[in-house]
Image (cartoon, helix red, strand yellow):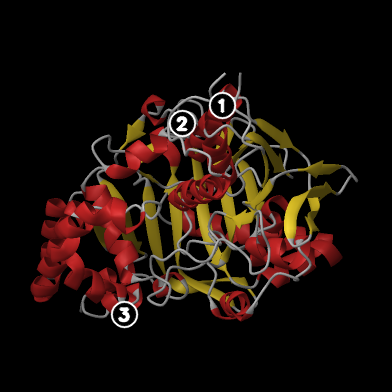
Amino acid sequence: MEHDAGKIIIIGGGIAGLCTAVYARRCGYQVEVLEMHDSAGGLATSWHRGDFTFETCLHWLLGSNPNREMYSRWLEVFDIDKLTFIYPDEFVRLETERGECLRIYSNVDRLEAELLKRGPEDAGEVRHLASAIRSLSKFRMPDLTEGWAGNWLTLLHDVPYLPLLRELSSVSSTEYGKRFTDPLLRSFFGEGDMGQLSALALFFSLAWMNSRDAGYPIGGSQAVIQNIAQKLGSLGGRLRLGVKVERILVEDDAAVGVQLVCGESIAADWVISAADGHATIYDLLGGKYRDKTTEKIYDEFKTFPSYLQVSLGVARDLSQQPGFVTRLLDTPLQVDPGTQLRQVSFRFFHFDPTFAPAGKTAVTCFLPTRNFEFWVQLQQHNPVGYEAEKQRIAEAVLSILERSVRDVRREIEVVDVSTPATVIRYTGNWKGSMEGWLLTPDSWYRQLPNTLPGLRQFLMVGQWVMPGGGLPSGLMTSRSAIQAVCKQDRTPFAERHPVMR
């Protein structure tokens, strides 16, 4: 007989919502996940156009190395060992319109040799960079769900790395890049909004790649999402698609369920929101349960920018291109009023055979912008102008691409353009943000409150309670949330044990 620990309603069927549901089922809770879209995943999604699949989320997954800590955590929510990971030699290649090229290798030894060759005058800084990557490759990430008692051995191991962590966490990526004289190497460290990322975030990414703990799973983000959804189904959890929550029901300052837009009410012992943080607090709860800390976070913290994505289905094998390339432009690209980009990034998905038929290639171009309101207003009030702007952006991206991929235009079979209006329509993400809170030197590596003042039986999970976003934030915040639920309910927390029947 199944142990009935109560019922949990989870709002949002993205990575955080699905992981939360799996943990809850393992602990004996009845679980119902409510997702407003017609497929699970949220921002971790892909879509089909003709013969092609286009990815918008996953560059790599932290936790692909079976010998590292995060791998065992993923095993708690799905069979990660069933995925096939690939490890590109190059993380990214930077190219100028004058033919200059800089390869950022995943292996730190090859990266160091490349950078020394490119900029011998920066030899001291290059060796410092390589040394930092090697050190962080050995760093053991503390488990935020285990507290001091569960992390003391890890923290003891990490003591020698604390000076390096302090150094890199205190500067932005752009500021760190100014240590180098070579302009192309400086460009690698980013500009604009993305350059505001903590330098430590970038160094950890390079360290994880060097230790082969950041592989790309064939099938992209949906390969991960569908595997977690299948695990939830096998445990008896319920995932409902195409249902939108209108408000969270509260009685005596305790969450008791939700009401859907269609009028249906669903009672629960706990409500956990894996949806957009701003919408949860200010819309679903009417702004009642907030304090100065909450308001300070939403007033002062910077979100990741929103973005446009131009996706191209090309009837050509482009495997000679790097998988990920950043093109530095002589003339900036005008994305929208207020947004000019001096560099654009392309992804050539020749490494994923599930994204295009043999001999063809799915290509995407990512264009960050903070002017989400321009695109939303245009889409709502001037549909003709909206389509014209999308065509203009597609044409501009094609013009950039064909400078390095000759005659590509005549082999384009599919052109698809998504905008911040698309992101907001499909995910509800505040400001169309790509990943919640930007990981800056001010917000580095700390979980924000997952409760709201004065409201019981309610928790939040996902990228709005852990700056930096990404799939691991969904996993880590979901684990800590269900641990808190189990502690309050005096229910044993089960990690991988099946629900008892």
Q: In which quarter of the image is residue 461?
A: bottom right
Q: Label 3 belongs to which residue?
A: 175
Residue 6 is situated, as x and y percent measured from the top left of the image, at 66, 37
- In this rendered view, identify the residue nearer to me: 147 or 375: 147
**Is tag 3's residue or tag 1's residue first in the polypeptide sequence?**
3
Q: Label 2 belongs to which residue?
A: 78
**Is tag 2's residue or tag 1's residue first in the polypeptide sequence?**
2
- In this rendered view, identify the residue nearer to me: 134 or 380: 134
Residue 313 shows in this picture: no
**Quadrant (top left/top right/bottom left/bottom right) for the N terminus:** top right
**411 left or right, relative to 345:** right
SS under mark 3: helix
Residue 148 shows in this picture: yes
Vertically, is 68 above or below 229? below
In space, the residues marked 3 and 2 are separated at their CA atoms by 39 Å
Asked whether the residues under the numbered discs 2 and 1 touch, taking CB atoms below 8 Å apart as contact, a structural biologist would say yes
Residue 442 is situated, as x and y percent measured from the top left of the image, at 41, 77
In space, the residues marked 3 and 1 are separated at their CA atoms by 44 Å
- In this rendered view, identify the residue nearer to me: 325 or 105: 105
SS under mark 1: helix
Residue 105 is situated, as x and y percent measured from the top left of the image, at 23, 52
Q: In which quarter of the image is residue 241?
A: top right
**431 left or right, relative to 499:** right
**148 left or right, relative to 59:** left
**Quadrant (top left/top right/bottom left/bottom right) for the C terminus:** top right
Q: Label 1 belongs to which residue?
A: 230
Amino acid at circle 1 = Gln
Asked whether the residues under the numbered discs 3 and 1 touch, taking CB atoms below 8 Å apart as contact, a structural biologist would say no
Query: Is disc 3 surrounded by few (<14), some (14 to 19) or many (20+) residues within 10 Å?
Result: some
